């Protein structure tokens, strides 16, 4: 849940930083999925935390087996969903992708906002968005990219693409954020809200 007032605080904070119009979008708290050499699907670095990973894989295997047994007992024979149960990667690119600087910081935040202005892309953290905005800590910028070399932004596809070809498909927090982005795209196209 995002309480009213958080978006306004973030936009006001960033207008003060950039001195130009901004739009802020609350990003999802869901885990990101990676397709980057040297990274696991969850974004952790290959070769680190091997023992912990071993036990986690055993636990995860037992959990998946239980889910499969439960699903088979309650299924109607349809498979549904994506082929093989795989979700499309949110982060893609070569080893040491430029996108990793942003997403590694993003993974640690409790209230991430992606903010766009004509010359800047930034990530701002507000902490939990469940509390009253008046009681929340002030917004804090944790990452930014300025012209002349910010990532290429495709709002309708929700992607940021860096010069090395790495791409971050940003997941939005809720339907409210999707509608806010759609209204922003319509205003860029010269149309009113639909």
Image (spheres, rainbow, N blue to C red):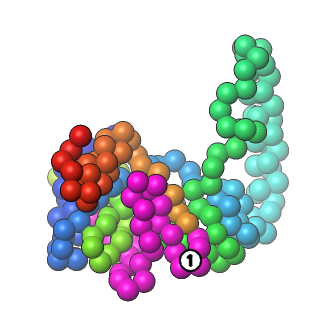
Give the quadrant of the N terminus: top left
Task: Check disc 1 and report its element: helix, strand or loop.
Answer: loop
State the residue in front, 189 or 72.
189
Q: Look at the image and tell me in which quarter the C terminus lies.
A: top left
Give whichever of 26, 53 is nearer the camera. 26
Residue 183 % position (x, y): 26, 48
Number of marks drawn: 1
For residue 80, above or below residue 29? above
The extreme bottom residue here reads: 148
Instruction: Answer above or below: position of 27 versus 17.
Output: above
Q: Is residue 65 above or below residue 70?
A: below
Q: In which image quadrant can residue 46 be found?
A: bottom right
What residue sits right under mark 1 in the picture? 98
Q: Position of residue 31 (x, y in %)?
A: 56, 51
Q: Residue at x 57, y 56 (%)?
A: 90
- In the image, residue 146 lies in the stretch drawn in magenta: yes
The answer to whether residue 7 is seen in the rendering is: no
Name the residue: 32% across, 75% down: 120
Residue at point 35% right, 83% down?
Answer: 147
- Which residue is at 41% across, 78% downward? 150
Left or right of residue 153: residue 115: left
Q: Is residue 147 magenta?
A: yes
Q: Local crowd at mark 1 within 10 Å, few (<14), some, or many (≥20)?
A: some
Q: Quadrant of residue 123?
A: bottom left
Q: Position of residue 3 (x, y in %)?
A: 25, 43
Magenta part of the protein: which range? 139-166
Left or right of 57, for residue 133: left
Asked where in the image residue 60 lies, by quadrant, the reply is top right
User: Is 132 left, or right, of 73 in this rendering?
Assistant: left
Q: Is residue 18 visible?
A: yes
């Amino acid at each position: 849940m995002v309480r009213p007032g958080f978006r306004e605080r973030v936009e006001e904070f960033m207008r003060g930083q950039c001195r130009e119009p901004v739009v802020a979008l609350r990003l999802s708290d869901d885990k990101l999925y990676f397709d980057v050499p040297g990274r696991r699907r969850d974004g952790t670095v290959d070769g680190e935390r091997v023992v912990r990973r071993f036990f986690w894989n055993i636990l995860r295997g037992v959990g998946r087996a239980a889910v499969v047994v439960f699903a088979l007992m309650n299924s109607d024979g349809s498979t549904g969903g994506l082929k093989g149960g795989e979700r499309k990667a949110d982060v893609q690119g070569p080893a040491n992708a430029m996108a990793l600087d942003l997403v590694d910081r993003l993974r640690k935040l409790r209230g991430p906002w992606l903010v766009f202005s004509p010359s800047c892309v930034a990530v701002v953290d507000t902490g939990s968005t469940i509390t009253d905005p008046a009681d929340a800590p002030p917004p804090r910028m944790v990452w930014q990219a300025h012209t002349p070399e910010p990532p290429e932004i495709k709002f309708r596809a929700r992607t940021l693409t860096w010069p090395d070809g790495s791409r971050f498909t940003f997941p939005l927090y809720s339907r409210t954020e999707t509608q806010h982005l759609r209204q922003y795209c319509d205003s860029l196209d010269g149309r009113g809200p639909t």
